[in-house]
Image (cartoon, rainbow, N blue to C red):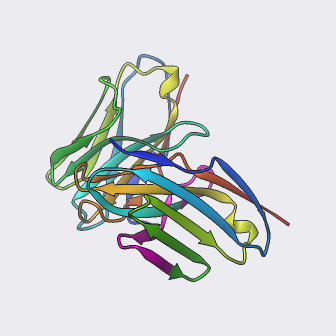
């Protein structure tokens, strides 16, 4: 158990819909990262927050947004969903910038 | 930006040794990480190198040469459970995050 909690574990939704994925980082970790992993592909960095502020942005679509709340949990919002958004979405946390990241078990999103 | 290259696939025999290479280009280098990921599961941290040289941890060792932009992960006494994807990730002080390579899928055969 990495100490990072993601909910829900599985999500099936229709095209055009909007979903929210939730992540609770390890206790004390200030950095939260979101990654997308499509089938048989590598981890694609989406966005990073540090202590409530956005710190880095990757190839995140405009239809996607995220935030980190004062209690340090984070949410990733995906809207106007398309079939190609089906993937595993991982959240990871680390104590500081540049230290090892601990990953949650992921949310498997299926868009039908 | 950052560029990370590692082989897509490797195959090795149970009990053998395998070396997985990773080359990278980055600005503001702040360490190199190796993660293991079994299919459908979360990546788990294996090792971290920030200085040149070899870090040994049980059956796994990781090496770094900053001047060459090169690292390798060495797995000894391979076991069937070592079949997984191995991800090289580079930390950057500029980006404040780690960028992952696409991973090397290792298959261990009896």
Percent position of residue A24, x then y: 31, 55
So how many labels did they put on this image?
0
Residue at the outermost front position? B67
Hey, which quadrant is residue A41 in on the image?
A: top right
What residue lies at 29% left-to-right and 61% top-to-bottom? Answer: A98
Is residue A71 toward the left or the right of residue B92 in the image?
left
Residue at the outermost right position? B110
Q: Tell me the quadrant of the picture where the N terminus of chain B can be found.
A: top left
Percent position of residue B16, x then y: 76, 73
Residue placed most toward the observer, A82 or A46: A46
What residue lies at 49% left-to-right and 54% top-to-bottom? Answer: B23
What residue lies at 47% left-to-right and 44% top-to-bottom? Answer: A43
Magenta-drawn segment: B36-55
Hey, which quadrant is residue B69 in on the image?
A: bottom left
Residue A67 seen in render: yes
The question of residue B43 being in magenta is answered with yes
Residue A104 seen in render: no
The question of residue A67 being in magenta is answered with no
Is residue B22 toward the left or the right of residue A79 in the image?
right
Residue B83 sits above or below residue B15 on the image: above
Percent position of residue B18, x then y: 69, 67
Residue B48 sits above or below residue A21 on the image: below
Is residue A2 toward the left or the right of residue B38 in the image?
left
Residue placed most toward the observer, B92 or B43: B92
Q: Tell me the quadrant of the picture where the C terminus of chain B can be found.
A: bottom right
Percent position of residue A106, x then y: 47, 49
């Amino acid at each position: 158990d990495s100490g990072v909690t993601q909910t829900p574990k599985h999500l099936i939704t229709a095209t055009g819909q909007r979903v929210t994925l939730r992540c609770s980082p390890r206790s004390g970790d200030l950095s939260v990262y979101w990654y997308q992993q499509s089938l048989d592909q590598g981890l694609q960095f989406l966005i990073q927050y540090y202590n409530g502020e956005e710190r880095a942005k990757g190839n995140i679509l405009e239809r996607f947004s995220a935030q980190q709340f004062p209690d340090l949990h984070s949410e990733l919002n995906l809207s106007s969903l398309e079939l190609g958004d089906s993937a595993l979405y991982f959240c990871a946390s680390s104590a500081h910038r540049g230290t090892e990241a601990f990953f949650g078990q992921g949310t498997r999103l299926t868009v039908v | 930006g950052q560029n990370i290259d590692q082989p897509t696939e490797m195959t090795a025999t149970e009990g053998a040794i395998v070396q997985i290479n990773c080359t990278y280009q980055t600005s503001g280098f702040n360490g190199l990480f190796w993660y293991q990921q079994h299919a459908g599961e979360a990546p788990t941290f294996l090792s971290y190198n920030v200085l040149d040289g070899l870090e040994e941890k049980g059956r796994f060792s990781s090496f770094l040469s900053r001047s060459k932009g090169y690292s390798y992960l060495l797995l000894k006494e391979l076991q069937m459970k070592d079949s997984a994807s191995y991800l090289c990730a580079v930390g950057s002080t500029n980006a404040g995050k780690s960028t992952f390579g696409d991973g090397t899928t290792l298959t261990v055969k009896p």
